[in-house]
Amino acid sequence: MTTDETRAGGLIDQVGVELEELRRAGDQLDEAVALQSGLNRTDLRCLGILYRRGRVTAGELAEESGLTPGAITTVLDRLERGGYANRVSDPADRRRVLVVSTGVTRDIGARMQGEVELALREVLERREPEQLEVVRDFLRDTRGVFESQIAALTAEAAPGAGESPADGGAAQSHAPLEGIGAGRLEFTKGASQVRLTGDPGLTELYRATFEGPAPEIFVRGGTVTVVQRRRFFQRANSCNFTLAASIPWDVVLRGGMWKLDADLRPLRLSSLEVTGGASDVEIELPAPVGVVQVRLSGGASQVKLRRPKGTEARAEVSGGASQLVFDDQQLGAVGGKIALASSGFDAAVDRYEIRFTGGASQLSVTTL
């Protein structure tokens, strides 16, 4: 081993140690702020979102914090009693309730995030531009690693994980199409290394092939439910799904997705939902019919969505984003909530409404 290789190996070890120490120090800072404020860590996380956003719906707060609707209600009760948040009617829609920050929340947020950001900025200003580029790229790559693992690990705790659908289905790798007017493909426990496409000539509802242990597949009417029994992120596992393109499809992928390659152009897509995180995802969308909802929640990293040229779309990101590309617009790091739309979106009858929640990095929404 050369001297340079020995030195590089030692530096890599030191970087690993410093990352671990950074996580520990960050945890201790959160604990100190929570203790001084009389809050727990979950309340503090929600408080940070309120500080950045100012006002959100309870549903948006639940999505960004990763809490269930029941859990977020309990948190909001505590925050409201402590004077950290208020629930008010939305002036634009009296049926909807908004959660708004208070002066106390803004004070804690400024101390918890504002002072730290200013101090870190002073540290960074001592570096040369070339050094800052190295730091930026390392942090982006590190975040991508973390989000890939989050997408994998959250599958283990996803709602319905390990449960079979209601009685009446049968495990199978294909099913008849006759008599089916619409399809629904649903992964209940996440998946990895999935290839998904449609086939206009397929005379069955779907076809599936696997490398490695196969999941259980249950069919009831036009609903195809995939239940992965093992940890889905075993690298040796992969699957190929082909859907009949003669019927419309709703596609629901719960529990996290890692390495999804979906060419949906042959299909009529009614909706697409990915929950529990997504990493290393490429999806080619068909021309929309009506308003087609696309939802990715729980964090997204290295996600590329492509739609046919001339298709109108709107992309909304909440929870912050970095490296966001929407058609010819390119944005760096942005906080809070941002929405970008194609020029003819408002007037279009056929269009995509795309929403990312829970934070995102390296997102791309472009045309084919």
Image: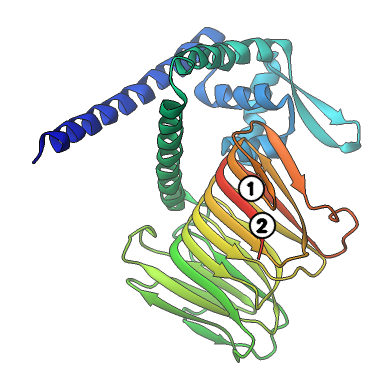
Q: What residue type is disc 2 on?
A: Thr
- Please tell me how crowded label 2 is: few (under 14), some (14-19), or many (20+) other residues with Cα within 10 Å: some
Q: How is the image coloured?
A: rainbow
Q: Is 251 on the left or on the right of 125, as rendered?
A: right
Q: Position of residue 161 (x, y in %)?
A: 47, 57
N-term mark: 1 or 2: 1
* Residue 165 seen in this snapshot: no
Q: Which mark is residue 366?
A: 2
User: Is residue 314 positioned above or below 199 on the image?
Assistant: above
* Quarter of the image that includes the C terminus: bottom right
Q: Is 73 on the left or on the right of 301, as rendered?
A: right
Q: Position of residue 313 (x, y in %)?
A: 76, 56
Q: Which mark is residue 325?
A: 1
Distance of label 1 from label 2 (alpha carbons): 7 Å
* Residue 232 seen in this snapshot: yes
> Mark 1 touching mark 2, by CB under 8 A?
yes
User: Is residue 84 positioned above or below 168 on the image?
Assistant: above
Q: Residue at x 62, y 12 (%)?
A: 110
Q: Is 37 on the left or on the right of 221, as rendered?
A: left
